[in-house]
Structure formats: structure tokens, C-alpha cells
Amino acid sequence: MAGAHRPPRRPLLAALGRSAVRHRWWYLVTWSVLVVAAFVTALGLGPGPGLFDRLTSGAIEAPGDALVVQDVTSADADGPALIGSVTGADLQDPALVGAVAAFAEDAGEVDGVAGVEAPVLHPQWPAAPEALVAVRDQDPSTGAFLLTVELEPEVTFPQARDVLVGLETAYAGSLAERTEAVDWGGVPLLVDDITDQIQVDLQRGEGIALPISLVVMVVVFGGVLAALMPILGAVASIGGGLAILLGFSYLIDLDATVVNIVTVMGLALCIDYGLLLVSRFREELDAVAPGVRHRDLSAEQVEAAVVGALTTAGRTVLFSGLIVGIALSGLVLFEAPIMRAIGAAGVAVVVVALLVALTLVPALAATWARRLGHRRGAGAVTDDGVFSRLAWAVQRRPVVTVVASTAVLLALAWPALGLRLTSSGTDLLPPGADQRVFFEQLEEDYPLVAAPDVVVLAQAPADEVEAWAETAAAVDGVLSVDPPQDLGPWPEDVPLAAGADADAPLVRLGVRVEEGPLGEPARDVVDALRAAPPPADGEVWVGGQAASLADFVDSVWDRAGWAAGWIAGATVVLLFLLSGSVVIPLKAVVLNVISLGASLGLTVLVFQHGNLEGLLGFESVGALESVIPLLVLAFGFGLSMDYEVFLLSRVIELHEQGQDDDTAVRLGVQRSGRIITSAALIMIVVFAGFAAGHMLAIKQTGFALAAAVLVDATLVRMLLVPATMTLLGRWNWWAPGWLRRVHARVGVSEHAPARGV
């Protein structure tokens, strides 16, 4: 079952290596121009809008009743609105009415303003109950009321800031003398704050990750130039990733949280791949020019080293990138637009990371080959070191290692069984953020202005709707049901839902519950209302945040099997092409699933249960953001397979050179251990840098992926993999005869010649 010696059958990487050496200046100039153009375009420094001007933020959507309710109720909605919370007014003063009217007139002259509403402008003020809704506690003596400024539908959220400047000028000219203060808020300002915070977190994460990564790689390589190669590749990856996301924003609504998640993945992968390639390049230099000082290297020796690095480590990078891309492409199979956006953008960024690693990094290596200086930590790895001794210890007691490591992983995964999901709105912003404070105060002072916790759309005769509303009011946890609101017939531009009548009138019911729109009572109320019989002659659709979350979870479960099958199946095929075995791929998938369970359990333990709140700087909402588990599984699976390929490629190389199984495993761990450990450390630094941000979703993602890398690079890659491979022995390489023949024809084998082993 041992692999036979075969010459390389894939000349593509070797040709790419030669091209990177002979045309290196063309590669460097081209990449420089592309990266500068990418940053200028993505950051909005050119003539068009930048990426952060085109981002959106909102509730997680998936097909279901909640989306029907949202589409119908927003079909005839006016443009976005800004809300001014006015305090210190004398609502009994007739002169206030004139001042508010003057403000409304001045505000109407501001570009983008469609109209102004205020309780004192109501014809029946102060007797009209609907006007008192916009007065704090519905009590004029509080001296506080709301100004609602409707914006034109074409006003974008970033443009709302410009409108706000005009409103503040109008307020100062007409209302400032008769009030104490006004605080402005609204969905446009909330989304703008979220995107601004994401941009700040992105800069903070990069500011932490890049310098520390450079220091780590200087230690690993023993020189600044060698360490700079992966860092420059990472910068190129960031620029390319941002430009790709800008392009995606014209095709789909791109949620603000996607940017950091996808960008950090590209950054981490590029550093990872650069580290592997540069390390192998310097190793190849020692092999092709033993004892030759770097400044005396010939052009032929440099080219041979670059080609050798690409045909070995380059193959590893290519396989790793394919597996990471496959893992992320699994997200495209889900119905929720945000998951498809993350999957599509993630795959595109992986392509950028691969292009950087296979073209820019080799060109940099060829350019700086003679200036790399001292080779400490960078030459050929000795076959006796800390990692070989660790592998030897594991091989002495493989059963104990497997049992102990698996027990630890299962214990870490245990909290994931109690996973609770949420879909935060203002809670995404850090405590104390202006818009978060505004909306929290708005809900407290003007409870009837805030959107109802659960929204019901009914289509039935009026008497049956009223009877159904009485039933809803009796459900445990319901505080009140708003009066029915007539919406007219089904909107023409909204697809007709199952059971709906295009001509029958629609009625909207607002249901207010205990503990807010995502508390347990709201979730129970949604379940109860959906389980309740609809009116005899009609239909009801239940929406709201809790309903949207329930639809999202149901949608995920509906597609989870297909996504998991695609990811696992494609990964098994790729690893089979690499190894010629069916045992190694299946074992890798099983170990990765256990590892990801452990990282998800750690994330639940910290963020859902509120551990380490002070250290990490967050307030637990008692749940994880709804997209986090999928991101951990997709991104984490890809990263875990990253290290699996790093290690397996060395073991397979030694196996194909004729080494016995235990020796191949021990030397494979030794030769890949330093790179895996260094790459894992840098990955953890990158993810920790983003976990230091203030956005809760980004913080959770950064922590979860850092935990995934830590668990995988230690317990799995250094202990479980060598232990299980030792136990399996020659069965590691087993495959049915027909599959061995398939691998002989289409499998990949580009091993390096033996180096005295």
C-alpha cells in the first residue's frame, strides 16, 4: 500500500514558479497597481462611493412567514425617518406650536426631507390620543416629545448624516429657544454607526494583527525581509478583499458584519500561506545551494528554490485553498441572503489569497533571495527536535493519547448542547454608543412608538380577526395587542403567499410581549400564535424579530444536510487525490467535527454564559448571534483542514519516499510542527485582534475562530492525528483496489527528493 516513486506530473506550479522568477518585476508592479487601486476604490477615495458607504444592516432574513409580513408591511412604507427626542419644552405654551411649525417649514427646505410630524401639530392636540403617543409617558407635563422627520425614499443611510446637519440648523433657528435639547436617532443613523464601528474595528484589528504577526515571523525567520513577504501578501489580500466586497455590494445587499468576517479570513490565510511558502523557499535554498552565502546565490539556484517551493509547499497551499473555498461555498447552499453573501464573498477572498501566495510571494522571494541574510530558524529542519520527541511520546502511548484528547474535546464541546441564538439590533453596538442609548431610551419613554415585538398579518373578515386578536391577547407573555390596522389589498409588487387572496383586505396586528422582541416570552408567543388555528375564513402570518430568527433556524436545518454533505464529500475527494487513501480523509473529517464542537462550546461558555465579560469587554446577551455557529463551522472547518494539509503533505511526502509509517508520521510532525505552530500563533493573533473590537458579532467570531485554531493546532494536530495514524499503521493508506487505480491515473504526487532520511 506504500506509494511508489513517481516523477511530478503537474508542471503548472513549476511553470508558475519559473514565471515568478523570470518576470518578477512585472508581477510586483502589477500587484502594486492593483492593490493601490483596490484600496482607493474600496475606501471611497476615488470618484465613486466606497465600500462602507454601501453596507446595510438589519434583521437576519430567511424564507418564511416573517419575511412575508416584512415585505407586505413595508411595501407602501415611506422613506426612512429621523427622530428627534426633544426635552425641556412647555407643551402647554401656545407659542411652542408656532415654533414647531416654523421648524417643520425650515426642515422641509432641507434636501432629502419629505415631511415633519410632531404631536403639537395634530389638529386635535392635545385631546387626540394618537398625538399623545409621541409624548413621553403620554403626559404633557414631562416636557418631552418626538419630532419625526420623514426622508425621501431615495435618501441613502450615509446621506442621512447630511440631512441631519440641515435639521440641526433648522432646530437652532426655530426651536432652540423654547426647548432644552434634542437628541437625534433613527435607523439610518443606527446603520451608519454600525458601519462606522465596523470600519474602526477593522482598522484596530489590522493594527494589532499586522505588527504582532511581523514580530512573530521575524523570530521564526530570523530576518525582517523574510518576515515582510507574508505581511506584504496580507496587505495585498486586504485590498483585494475589500475591492471584491465592493463589487458584491452592487449585486446583493451586503450586511455590515460581512466585511470584517471575510477580510479577517483573507488576512489570516494570506499570512498562513506566505509563512509556509517562504519557509519552504528558504529550506529549498539550503538544499540547492548548501553552504552558499545568500549574496552569492546564482540566478539558477534562486529559480530552483522558488520552483521547488511552489511544487511542494505551493501544492499544499493550493489544496488548502481549495478545501477552505469548498467549506465556505457550503454557505451558498443556505437560503438566508446573509449566508450566501458571506459564502460567495469568502470564496472570492480565498481566490485572492491563493493568487497572492502563488504569484506575489514567489516574486518577492526571488527579488529578495540574495538579501535574506542569516538563516536562523529558516533552513532545513533537523529531524530531531521538540516536535519529533513529542510525536515519539505520543506513539509510545497512542491509546491513552486518543482517549485523553477526545475526552478533553468532548468536555469542551458540552456547553454547545445548550446553544441559544439571537439576532441583535442595537445590542451589536457597544454599551454607551449614541444610537444604542437613543433606542434604549426611546423604548423606555415612548413604548407605543417603538415597533411591536410580534407583528401579525391577517386576511379574514373583521369579526374573525377581532376574535383571533382576543385569543392572541390571552397567550401567556402577551402584554397587549394593538388595534387592527387596515392595509388594503395584497400589494402588487409582493409575491402572493400560500393561502392568500390577492383582493381580500389585509389587517396588521401589533403584539407587545414581556422582555422585548427576542426574549423567551416573545419566542414562546410566536410558537403559540403559529400553532393556533387561523380564522375559519382566512389566514394569518406571524412576523417580528423572534419569528425571523425561528424562520432562519428552520431554514438552516432544512439545508444543513446538503451543505454538510457537500463540504465533507468534496473534502474527502480532495484529500483522496492528495493521499490515495480513503481512511485519512474520513478520519480528518471526523476529527475536525469534534474539534469544531469544542471551539463552539468554548464560545458558548464565554459569550452565552457571560464568562470573561470584563476581560473581553462585552455584555452578554445570553445567546450567540445567529450566524456565528455557521461561520465557526464553515471557516473553522477550512482552517482546520489548512493544518491537516500542512501536516499530511509532509507525511505523504515521506511515505512516498519509502519511509515506514511511524517514521513518516514522526518526521512529518517534526518538519511541519514549527510551521503549524507559528501559523497557528499568527492566526490566533489575527483573530484576537478582531475580537478586541467593539462589535459583538465580530468579537464573537474572532474569539470562536481563535479558539478553533488553538484547539486544532494543539490537541488535534500535534496529539490526535499522530496518535490515530500510529494506531492505524499501514491501514492509513488503505483504499479499495479500483480507487487505487483511479488515484494512479488522476492522483497528485509532487514530492521532493529525499534529504538523507
Image: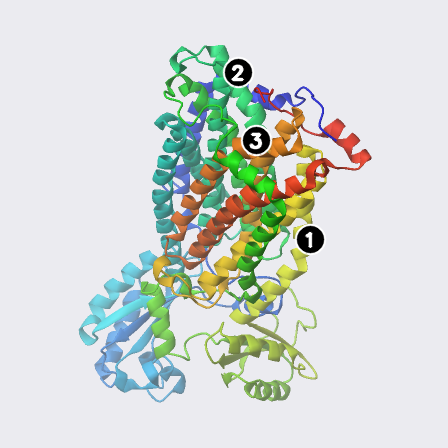
Query: First in sequence: mark 3 or mark 1?
Result: 1
Mark 1 element type = helix
Q: Is residue 84 left or right of residue 468?
A: left
* Observer able to see residue 160: no
Which of the two residues, 482 or 462, is positioned nearer the viewer here? 482
- Which tag, 1 or 2, sits closer to the chain's start? 2
Horizontal arrangement in the rendering, residue 93 relative to residue 676 (left or right): left
Kind of residue at disc 1: Trp
* Furthest residue toward left: 177
Q: Is residue 173 visible?
A: yes
Residue topped by disc 1? 562
Residues tagged 3 and 2 counted as in contact (Cβ below 8 A): no
Q: Amino acid at mark 3?
A: Leu
Residue 304: assigned label? 2
Is residue 327 or residue 757 the one in the foreground?
757
- Find the distance from the CA under tag 1 to the CA under tag 2: 44 Å
Q: Which residue is mark 3?
A: 667
589 or 369, which lies in front? 589
Crowd around label 3: few <14 · some 14–19 · many ≥20 (10 Å): many
Q: Residue furthest right?
A: 738
Query: Is label 3 or label 2 in front?
Result: 3
Residue 215: image x %, image y %? 35, 36
Q: The C terminus lies in which quarter of the figure?
A: top right
Say which of marks 3 and 1 sits in front.
Answer: 3
Q: Quadrant of residue 410?
A: bottom right
